Structures are given as structure tokens and as C-alpha cells.
């Protein structure tokens, strides 16, 4: 008989959250939902409460919490305190972090302090707080299991080998919505163009990050902390088919890659069930239909956000906090139609120019820097 794992999901109404619940639906004898946190989609959260019967839930606003409380008998919390209740419920063994942005840092840090294992989709947490988060996870003996497909692939490709045997870690990138666009066409890109990702169906923020390739930059920093590797061992290669999810090159020249169709249910299931594997509703790879796999170097002139993030990865920790906060603001300004696509990178770069990189001391310190960079980026957006 498999053991039933009790999970909390932060961001249950999002793309990753919904895919995770599809897996729960298939494997009710192995995973049980204890608590859910969502942002503003109260109708969907209500349907999830009815179907998955959690012990408690949380939403962003007090108003939505009141509305939900009229429709359910379980406790409904709201705001940062609500997120804290969701991870702190005594039955929670694993927290799936699937919110967007640095807002996930505090609840995940709390979950680690409470000894919960973490399935981590919310990459901005490691970008902003990687060093502190990993140190706390080691101290508490908790497992940090990546959900991001690249990092799941790397983890799977590293199995059975020691750090000394690794020569390079190569992250694949689809190239996002604009991989076939010229720099000239890019200047006129609309919101709909940017949201039209060729291979993956994801939340809006990560889809825009994929179009700028800031997503790959964030993933480099995520990998640096998750696998405790020197930044110069990490490389990015464009792979338009998104079949090879990432690879590890060993000192003897062998390369181990993890492959599959691009469907997030596979890495989510790997993190939820680790170290076991169970069937998920993901189509098999049809090799003859795939036929060819292509690889090319990313053009850093076309993707300045990737170059910026590569640079930031080699600086002291605060630079990544500033880059991440400014990027979150720049992406939301773009999605509201307030700035053109090309201004996203410029805004992040300008925010960084006002900052002197230094060492990070605490979560409070990170949150202060995060606030500062958001404020600064907002001011820049108005100029
Ligand atoms: P999404 O926008 O679809 O969903 C985000 C979820 O978080 C929603 O449920 C939203 O309501 C909730 N949320 C947002 N702010 C909140 C807050 N303050 N309090 C409580 N809930 C809040 O995003 P997504 O695409 O599912 O991505 C989630 C994370 O996973 C991101 O960090 C993303 O980079 C990462 N990720 C996503 C994918 C993917 O395929 N979608 C792949 C790899 C990594
Ligand atoms: Mg990824």
C-alpha cells in the first residue's frame, strides 16, 4: 500500500496548481490535500474546496475570504496570515509552492522552519533568497524538490553521481514566443504576441519571462542555489522542440539528459512522489514524429534580459533580489499596456543601476530590498 502524503498547495488556482490537482485526482490513495491558497479566483477555489475537501483555505483579500466563508464550513483565511495558516496546519508534510513572485518567500521559509518538504515551482523564491533558503533547508533537513522542468531534469540526470564528476549543467530554452522574430519585429510586439508561447501553456508572468528569456536567467540563478554549483558551470542552449528538458555533462564527456513531451504534469508528479514514479496523464514521446531535435546558441543581443541575469548571477546576492523585483513590476506594467515590450529589460537594468550589490543577511533584509526595487521600478515606469 502506498503511503498517503498530505500536501498544502500555494497557488492552487494557477497553471501549476491546477495541474497538480489533476495528479491528486488520479492518485487519491497517495496524495491528500490539507490546505489550499489562491489569489483572487474565488469561484475556482470554491470548486476545488468541494472536490478536494481541504481542512482550510486562504485567499488574498478579506472580501473574497468573506464571500467564500458564506459558501463553505471550513475556515477561510486571507492575506499573509492566511498563507501562514496554510503551511502551518499540523498535518502538512509537503508544500507545493506554486504562487508567482517573491510573495512566496515568507510562507516557504516558514514551511522549511516547520520541517515541511517543499516542491518548488515558484522560482522567484530561490532567485531572491536562494542562499538563505538552501541553508535553512539543510539545517532543517527538509527536501527541496524542483518542479521547474529544467531543474527536475537536472535532478534526475544527477542521480547517482557526485558533484566532483560534473563538468557542466546545460539548461535548455524554447526561445519563447519570439524565437523566430527579428529584432525589428520585436520592437512592435503586442501583449497577445508575447502571451502566445509555442510549446507551453503557463501563467502570464512566466510566459512574458519566457519571451524576454528572463525566465532562463531566473532559472540559471535557481539552478546555482539548488545544485550548489559555480555560476560558470551553467550554460543555456536554445532547443525549440522542448523535448530535452536539460542535461548534465560529466567529466568523462558523457552527457545525461532527461526527455519527454513538454507537459508540466511530469515534473510536478516527480516532485510530489519522489523518489517513486507513478503513471500520469502525459502522452508518450513519439520519436518518429519528433524526428529532429535542434540546438543553437542564444542571441544575447536579442535577449538582453538573459545577458543581464547571467551578469547578476555572478554578483553579490542583493543584485538578484533587485533584478527580480524590478522584473516583476516591469512585466506587470507591460501586461497592463503601460510600457512596450522592449522597455521591460531597460527598466530592470535602470533599477539595478541605482543599487550597490551586497551580501544578504536575512529574509527581512530581502523583503526590504524587494520593496525598494519595486518602488524604484514603478517610478521609472512613470517617467
Ligand atoms: P499562475 O499565474 O497561473 O498561478 C499563480 C497562482 O498563485 C494562482 O493560483 C494565483 O491566484 C496565486 N497567487 C498569486 N499571488 C498570490 C498571493 N499573493 N497569495 C496567494 N496566492 C497567490 O502561475 P503559474 O504559471 O502556475 O506559475 C507559478 C510559479 O511556477 C511561477 O513562479 C512560475 O515561474 C513557476 N513555473 C511555472 C511553470 C508553468 O508551466 N506554469 C513552469 C515552471 C515554473
Ligand atoms: Mg522552466
Image: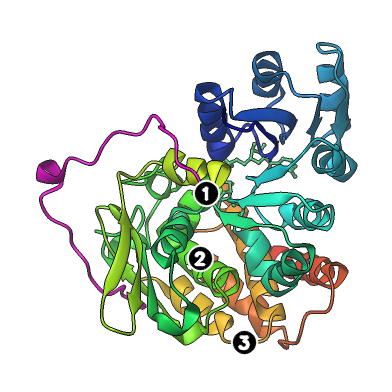
Q: Where is residue 269 in the image (x, y as percent from the top left)?
A: 49, 40
In the rendered structure, does residue 40 fall within the stretch colored magenta? Answer: no
- Residue 65 in view here: yes
How many discs appear? 3
Start-end of magenta stretch: 276-301
Instruction: Name the spot of residue 124 as percent of width and height, x first.
Output: 63, 60
Is disc 1 surrounded by few (<14), some (14 to 19) or many (20+) residues within 10 Å? Answer: few
Q: Residues within 10 Å of mark 3 (few under 14, many from 20)?
A: some
Above-or-below relation of 304 to 36: below
- Up-down: is 58 above or below 204? above
Is residue 342 in sight in this rendering? no
Query: Which of the two discs, 1 and 3, labels the residue nearer the N terminus?
Result: 1
- Callout 2: CB less than 8 Å from ligand 2: yes
How far from the left and from the top, in percent, is residue 245? 35, 57
Q: Name which residue lies at 50% across and 71% down.
A: 220
The residues tagged by marks 2 and 1 sit, at their Cα atoms, a distance apart of 23 Å
Asked which quadrant contains residue 286, the reply is top left
Residue for badge 3: 315
In what element is the residue under mark 1?
A: loop
Residue 73 x/y as whole percent: 86, 13
The secondary structure that dominates the magenta segment is: loop
Amino acid at each position: 500500500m502506498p503511503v498517503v502524503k498530505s500536501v498544502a498547495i500555494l497557488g492552487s488556482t494557477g497553471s501549476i496548481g491546477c495541474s497538480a490537482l489533476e495528479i491528486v485526482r488520479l492518485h487519491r490513495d497517495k496524495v491528500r490535500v490539507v490546505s489550499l491558497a489562491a489569489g483572487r479566483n474565488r469561484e475556482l477555489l470554491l470548486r476545488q474546496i468541494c472536490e478536494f475537501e481541504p481542512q482550510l483555505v486562504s485567499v488574498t483579500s478579506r472580501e473574497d475570504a468573506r464571500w467564500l466563508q458564506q459558501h463553505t464550513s471550513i475556515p477561510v483565511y486571507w492575506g499573509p496570515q492566511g498563507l501562514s495558516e496554510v503551511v502551518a496546519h499540523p498535518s502538512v508534510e509537503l508544500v507545493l509552492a506554486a504562487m508567482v513572485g517573491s510573495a512566496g518567500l515568507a510562507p516557504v521559509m516558514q514551511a522549511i522552519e516547520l520541517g515541511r518538504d517543499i516542491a518548488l515551482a515558484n522560482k522567484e523564491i530561490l532567485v531572491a533568497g536562494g542562499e538563505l533558503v538552501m541553508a535553512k533547508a539543510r539545517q532543517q533537513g527538509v527536501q527541496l524538490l524542483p518542479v521547474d522542468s529544467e531543474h527536475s531534469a537536472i535532478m534526475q540526470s544527477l542521480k547517482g553521481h557526485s558533484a566532483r564528476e560534473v563538468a557542466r549543467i546545460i539548461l535548455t530554452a524554447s526561445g519563447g514566443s519570439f524565437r523566430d522574430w527579428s529584432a525589428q519585429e520585436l520592437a512592435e510586439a503586442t501583449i497577445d504576441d508575447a502571451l502566445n508561447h509555442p510549446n507551453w501553456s503557463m501563467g502570464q508572468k512566466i510566459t512574458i519571462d519566457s519571451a524576454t528569456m528572463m525566465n532562463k536567467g531566473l532559472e540559471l540563478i535557481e539552478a546555482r542555489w539548488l545544485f550548489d554549483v559555480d555560476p560558470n558551470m551553467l550554460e543555456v542552449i536554445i532547443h525549440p522542440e522542448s523535448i530535452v528538458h536539460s542535461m548534465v555533462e560529466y567529466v568523462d564527456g558523457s552527457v545525461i539528459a532527461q526527455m519527454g513531451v513538454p507537459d508540466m504534469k511530469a515534473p510536478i508528479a516527480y516532485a510530489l512522489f519522489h523518489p517513486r514514479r507513478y503513471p500520469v496523464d502525459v502522452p508518450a514521446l513519439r520519436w518518429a514524429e519528433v524526428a529532429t531535435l535542434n540546438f543553437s546558441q542564444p542571441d544575447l543581443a536579442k535577449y538582453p534580459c538573459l545577458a543581464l541575469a547571467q551578469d547578476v548571477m555572478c554578483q553579490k546576492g542583493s543584485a538578484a533580489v533587485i533584478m527580480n523585483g524590478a522584473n516583476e513590476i516591469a512585466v506587470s506594467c507591460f501586461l497592463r499596456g503601460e510600457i512596450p515590450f522592449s522597455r521591460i529589460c531597460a527598466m530592470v537594468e535602470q533599477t539595478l543601476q541605482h543599487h550597490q550589490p551586497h551580501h544578504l543577511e536575512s529574509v527581512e533584509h530581502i523583503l526590504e530590498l524587494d520593496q525598494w526595487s519595486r518602488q524604484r521600478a514603478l517610478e521609472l515606469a512613470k517617467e
